[in-house]
Image (tube, rainbow, N blue to C red):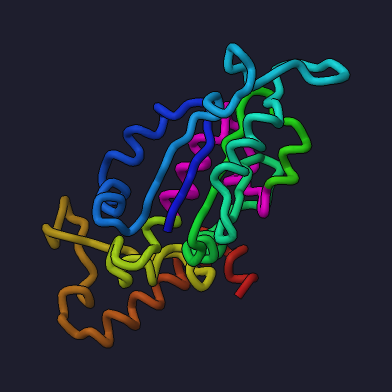
């Protein structure tokens, strides 16, 4: 997979792509991630990318020209263009799985007061990570990248995400490690039994119980 991110603040991604699982996925060739500064595509002598909105109002608005040129320079027949915006569809694990099968993602990070409405015409999909507003689309773009990259073949063990929270509209089961007794809090006996069938049964029960207690709305979708 190839991912191109368009942003006004490319340095925000330096640590994200240079650490942990994302870094290893890039180094092993499982994914290519390129961060592009939108200003590099500006035709303004001063690399201007924003202006006041017509009709007045607070804040600056991203202009269409730099973003149109950037997307057109990067796009191919295999590309899926994503616009990060609070007005998009709410992101979830199902969408992460769908995106993990794409060959090329182009992610546009909004900023300032917003972006020229005509930029929406570039997007195949608009995504929001929740019902709140951030200063820009950079952190949401990282969320999408992280959630998708970890699902790519060979990035992590398949078993590690097969029972993730939200798969099958269930939360994940509890996990424990050593010591088996920590300050009086003991690991459930079934996990120490070595009986794999019983362990799997317990984990399934715990997923359902935890979902019922914490996110009953997910059970309604099943």
* Residue at 57% across, 46% down: 129
* Residue at 76% across, 16% down: 52
Q: In this view of the protein, can residue 166 be seen by the observer?
A: no
Give coordinates of residue 161: x percent, y percent.
37, 66
Q: Residue furthest left?
A: 179
* Residue 142 part of the magenta-drawn span: yes
Q: In the figure, is residue 13 to the left or right of 73? A: left
Q: Nearer the viewer, residue 176 or 138?
A: 138
Q: Nearer the viewer, residue 77 or 2?
A: 77
Above or below, 96 against 8 in this view is: below
The answer to which quarter of the image holds residue 28 is bottom left
The answer to which quarter of the image holds residue 175 is bottom left
Q: In the figure, is residue 158 to the left or right of 49? A: left
Instruction: Report the magenta residues as a range.
Output: 123-147
Above or below, 164 against 198 in this view is: above
Q: Quadrant of the N terminus?
A: bottom left
Give coordinates of residue 138: x percent, y percent.
51, 35
Q: Quadrant of the C terminus?
A: bottom right
Q: Nearer the viewer, residue 203 or 2?
A: 2
Give coordinates of residue 20: x percent, y percent.
26, 46
* Residue at 33% across, 78% down: 202
* Residue at 47% across, 73% down: 208
Q: Residue furthest right?
A: 55
* Residue 218 part of the magenta-drawn span: no
Q: In this view of the protein, can residue 22 be seen by the observer?
A: yes
Q: In the figure, is residue 171 to the left or right of 67? A: left
Above or below, 93 against 45 in this view is: below
Q: What is the tally of numbered marks visible in this picture? A: 0
């Amino acid at each position: 997979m190839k991912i191109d991110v368009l942003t006004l603040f490319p340095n925000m991604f330096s640590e994200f792509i240079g650490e942990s699982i994302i870094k290893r996925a890039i180094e092993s060739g499982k994914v290519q991630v390129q961060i592009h500064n939108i200003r590099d595509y500006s035709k303004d002598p001063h690399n201007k990318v924003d202006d006041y909105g017509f009709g007045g109002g607070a804040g600056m608005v991203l202009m269409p020209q730099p973003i149109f040129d950037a997307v057109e320079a990067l796009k191919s027949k295999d590309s899926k263009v994503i616009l990060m915006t609070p007005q998009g569809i709410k992101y979830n694990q199902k969408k992460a799985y769908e995106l993990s099968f794409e060959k090329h993602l182009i992610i546009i990070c909004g900023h300032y007061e917003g972006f020229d409405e005509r930029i929406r015409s570039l997007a195949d999909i608009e995504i929001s990570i929740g019902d709140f507003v951030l200063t820009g689309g950079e952190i949401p773009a990282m969320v999408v990248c992280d959630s998708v990259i970890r699902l790519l073949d060979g990035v992590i063990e398949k078993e590690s995400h097969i029972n993730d929270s939200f798969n099958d509209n269930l939360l994940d089961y509890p996990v424990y490690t050593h010591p088996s007794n920590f300050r009086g809090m003991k690991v459930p006996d079934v996990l120490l039994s070595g009986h794999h069938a019983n362990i799997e049964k317990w984990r399934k029960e715990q997923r359902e119980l935890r979902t019922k207690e914490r996110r009953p709305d997910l059970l309604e979708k099943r």
